[in-house]
Image (cartoon, grey):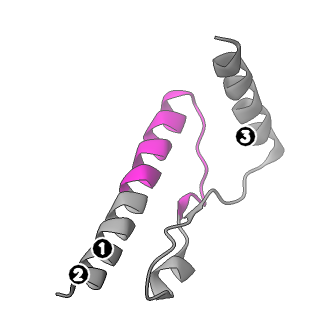
Amino acid sequence: MTRERRAAAETMTEAEAACGELAAVLKETGIVLPSLGVDPVTYGYEAPRALVELGRCNVATTRKLIEVLQRAAAR
């Protein structure tokens, strides 16, 4: 495996791990983003850009996310 391919694989692994961590933390606060995942187009680039797609959610989930972020910001 070339150095570039290894770096690309590490970038994607890091993005997938970060996505999993975010999902776990959100779940602890009662928030589930059903479309959360690594953007599949990201895998198509020679040097992956590792974009995490937060996806779509309903208004109730959006309000819950706002509430949690506001509480965290106030600390």
Q: Which residue is mark 3?
A: 61
Q: From the top left corner, tell me how far across and down residue 15 is, in percent.
A: 42, 60
- Circle 1 crowding by C-alpha within 10 Å: few under 14, some 14–19, many from 20: some
User: Which residue is at a point 52% across and 77% down the rendered structure image?
Assistant: 42
Cα–Cα gap, marks 1 and 2: 6 Å
Residue 53 versus residue 8 in the image, above or below: above
Residue 13 x/y as whole percent: 32, 64
Q: Which residues are magenta?
A: 17-37
Distance, label 2 to label 3, CA atoms, is 41 Å
In this view, the residue in front, 25 or 50, is: 50
Q: Residues within 10 Å of mark 3 (few under 14, many from 20)?
A: some
The three-letter amino acid code for the residue at tag 3 is Thr
Secondary element type, mark 1: helix
Residue 7: assigned label: 1
Q: Which residue is mark 2?
A: 3
Spot occupied by residue 48 in the image (x, y as percentages of width and height): 46, 77
Q: Is residue 9 left or right of residue 37?
A: left
Seen from this angle, which residue lies furthest top?
75
Q: Residue at 73%, 40% (x, y): give it.
A: 61
Local crowd at mark 2 within 10 Å, few (<14), some, or many (≥20)?
A: few
Q: Nearer the viewer, mark 2 or mark 3?
A: 2
The reply to whether callout 1 and callout 2 are in contact (CB within 8 Å) is: yes
Q: Residue at x 55, y 66 (%)?
A: 51
Which type of secondary structure does the marked residue at label 3 adopt?
A: helix
